[in-house]
Image (cartoon, rainbow, N blue to C red):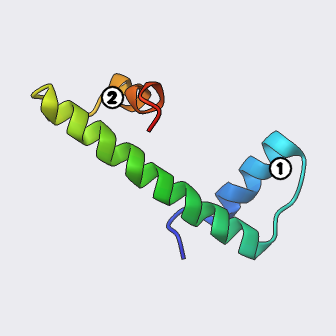
Amino acid sequence: MANIPRAAIRQLVRKYFKATITEGGADELARMLEAEAEKISKFAVENAKREKRNKVSKGDIAKYVVNGE
């Protein structure tokens, strides 16, 4: 199981889509979101290191989208 709580996934789906989601669906979505967050985090950390910084900035994360990763 993923670390993102089902309740958080359910709230997001309800808030943005006015729909409900099954427990299995919430679990799968949480796993997918965590996998994507891992990729973004890795990119952002590597970018910060290239720029000789120890902290990841908002810009490092935004570059992930700009670079089409």
Q: How crowded is mark 1: few (under 14 residues within 10 Å), some or many (20 or more)?
A: few
**Numbered label attached to residue 14:** 1
User: Residue extending furthest left?
Assistant: 52
12 vs 44: above or below: below
* Label 2 Cα crowd, 10 Å radius (few <14 / some 14-19 / many 20+): some
Q: Where is residue 5 in the image (x, y as percent from the top left)?
A: 60, 64
Residue drawn at point x = 72 percent, y = 48 percent: 12
Taking depth in this image into account, of 18 and 35 the one nearest to the observer is 35
Q: Position of residue 8 (x, y in %)?
A: 66, 56
Q: Residue furthest right?
A: 18
Residue type marked 1: Arg
The vertical placement of 65 against 23, above or below, is: above
User: Which residue is disc 2 drawn over?
Assistant: 60
Mark 1 vs mark 2, foreground winner is 2
Residue 44 on image: x %, y %: 31, 37
Q: Looking at the image, which residue is at 49% across and 52% down?
A: 36
Q: Is residue 55 visible?
A: no
